[in-house]
Structures are given as structure tokens and as C-alpha cells.
Image: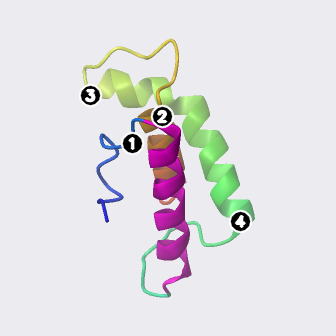
Amino acid sequence: MHSLNDTTWVRTRADLVSYVRQLSQEAEAPASGWENQSLHGYLEALSAWTNDMDGYFINRGEPVPDQPQWSLTADMLRAAYFYE
């Protein structure tokens, strides 16, 4: 099992499937610490983070990607875990 905080291992569609399964399992755990515990809150956070993600890359000194990679999709899903 890979770390959910490190998405660099998500390189293929199969990796993303595995990552989403792990997210699902973590979301089920009562002590997981998810900020956005309802589906509505999670999807709102996913939308907001995706809209604001240029700042994420700029703050890290990285170029904003033109085309997302599988790992970026995983980053987006993970960010909705805590983004407000």
C-alpha cells in the first residue's frame, strides 16, 4: 500500500484506481481526520482546489501543467480531503 500523501507513484490509470480505493478506505475510518466528510463538502473542495490549483504550482516554484498527469488527478482528489 502506498502513501496517500505522496502521489508521485500514480502514473497509470490502474495506479489512480488503486489510489481512489485507498482514499475510499481512509474516508471510512472515523479517525481519519478528513476535513470534508460529506460528499457535498468533498466535491465543493475538489472544485475549489481545481479552480485555484495554479497557485499551488506557483507557490512550489513549479510550472503549471498544460495537460494533467494521472498523479495530478490524484493530487486533486487528495487536496479535496482538506481544502476549504
Within 10 Å of the Cα at label 4, are there few (<14), some (14-19), or many (20+) other Cα atoms? few
Q: Residue furthest front?
A: 14
Looking at the image, which is closer to me, 76 or 3?
3
Q: Which of pointers 1 and 3 indicates the residue nearer the eye? A: 1
Within 10 Å of the Cα at label 2, are there few (<14), some (14-19), or many (20+) other Cα atoms? many
Labels 2 and 1: the sequence-earlier one: 1
Q: Position of residue 71 (x, y in %)?
A: 42, 37
- According to the image, label 4 marks what residue? 39
Labels 2 and 3: the sequence-earlier one: 3
- According to the image, label 1 marks what residue? 10
Numbered circle sitting on residue 35:
none
Quick check: 40 above or below 79? below
Labels 1 and 4: the sequence-earlier one: 1
Q: How is the image coloured?
A: rainbow
- Residue 55 on the magenta segment: no
Q: Which of pointers 4 and 3 indicates the residue nearer the eye? A: 4
Are the two marked residues, 4 and 2, in contact with CB atoms closer than 8 angstroms? no
Q: Please state which amino acid type lies under the numbered disc 1.
A: Val
Looking at the image, which is closer to me, 71 or 80?
71
Measured Cα–Cα span from mark 1 to mark 3: 19 Å
Q: Please state which amino acid type lies under the numbered disc 3.
A: Arg
- According to the image, label 2 marks what residue? 70
Q: Which of pointers 4 and 2 indicates the residue nearer the eye? A: 2
Are the two marked residues, 2 and 1, in contact with CB atoms closer than 8 angstroms? yes
- According to the image, label 3 marks what residue? 60
Q: Which residues are magenta?
A: 12-29
Q: Which element is circle 1 on?
A: loop
